[in-house]
Amino acid sequence: MRFKYYAPTTLEEISKLKEEGGLLFAGGTDVFVKMKAEVLNPEVLIDTKKIETPGVKCTENELEIFMNTTYTDVIKNDCAKKFEPLVKILLEVGSPQIRNRGTPVGNVGNASPAGDFLLATHLLDGTVVLAPSMREVKVEELVSGPGKLNMGKGEFIYSVKLKKLEGYKTFYEKVGRRNALVISIASIAAAVKLNGEIIEDVKIAYGSLGPTIVRFKDLEEEMKGKKLTEDLIEEFSLKYQARINPITDVRASAEYRKKLAKNLLVKAFISSMQKF
Ligand SMILES: Cc1cc2nc3c(=O)[nH]c(=O)nc-3n(C[C@H](O)[C@H](O)[C@H](O)COP(=O)(O)OP(=O)(O)OC[C@H]3O[C@@H](n4cnc5c(N)ncnc54)[C@H](O)[C@@H]3O)c2cc1C
């Protein structure tokens, strides 16, 4: 395999090379696997790691993760730990080696429905800053399907911003075929805010159950103001099961995935009923 390798030092150079058809990589944990499997055969590879960024910027309410920042950089950041359930999710990505090399921005760039960080962005109201213009777009508008990013040919992700969930109980679970290095069959990230027994707010995002991360905001709205009871959990977990439309692949059947969608939601709600 022959390709040209560039390691630009400015955002403008990256943009120009990308516009001409070059493929970006940061950690390369997706790109090189796909190149080895001959799924990708780029003529030009653009290594972004010469771009210096602040790494992680964290304030009371907002966490910004820049390009080239690894999972380990984020996991080690004390302020990022307050953006639950982010660090819990990141600790489930790959292995220590993958977390030392792979980047959250690359996870959004890969746009896989099984992407664990991508799942977190849907729960934490994620937006991306696109270089070189620095325009801001919601992640759910950027990613529209497997590997599909709605952005210009010369655009790329400079950073991802996440909002903190205040007063929520959060839940995350990933189901796979083994315990380590799991690509999920299904995953859920959920956040429930209760006022006594009343659901004040709820957010539920699923991974690996559709062409991208799945969230049904109309069902979330329907639950608001209702009492969190076993009957309500049963009613809505069945509604989610009916609405989810996953595929059958080598990892699991569609039917099994639909059952998982229901059971994971029940677990998320039961965990939210437990006291802080
Ligand atoms: C053994 C193994 C286990 C894994 N386990 C998991 C797991 O548990 N969960 C999980 O979610 N993923 C997993 N992955 C996938 C991968 O590690 C992650 O998706 C990681 O976040 C990719 O980051 P990266 O920097 O290595 O991306 P790269 O491979 O460098 O790039 C990935 C994609 O993003 C694009 N890209 C890179 N930078 C940018 C940018 N700045 N703007 C726009 N697009 C960009 C690239 O062109 C490419 O399409 C695993 C991979 C391996 C090999």
Image (cartoon, rainbow, N blue to C red):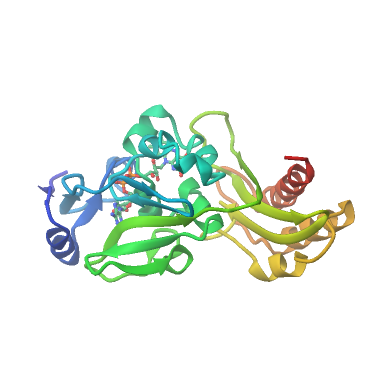
**Which residue ends up furthest to the right in the rendered image?**
231
x then y, percent, for residue 234: 84, 55
Lateral position of residue 43 relative to residue 273, left or right: left
Is any atom of residue 113 visible in this view? no
Q: Estimate the x, y position of residue 166 in percent, counting from the top left.
A: 60, 53
Q: Which residue is drawn at 36% across and 68% down?
A: 136
Which quadrant of the rendered structure holds the N terminus?
top left
For the image, the number of numbered tags is 0
Q: Can residue 109 be seen in this view?
A: yes
Q: Position of residue 158 (x, y in %)?
A: 29, 57
**Residue at image coords 30%, 45%:** 55
Q: In which quarter of the image is residue 79?
A: top left
Q: Which of 208 and 174 is in front in this view?
A: 174
**Residue 19: x and y, percent?**
18, 67
Asked whether 176 or 158 is in front, the reply is 158
Q: Which image quadrant is residue 231 in?
A: bottom right
The answer to whether residue 136 is left or right of residue 163 is left
Q: Quadrant of residue 221?
A: bottom right
Position of residue 254 relative to residue 30, above or below, is below
Classify residue 147 as left or right of residue 10: right
Say if 173 sits above or below 239 in the image.
above
From the viewer's perspective, tell me whether residue 237 is left or right of residue 73.
right
The C terminus appears in which quarter of the rendering?
top right
Decide which of 271, 7 is in the foreground and name it: 271
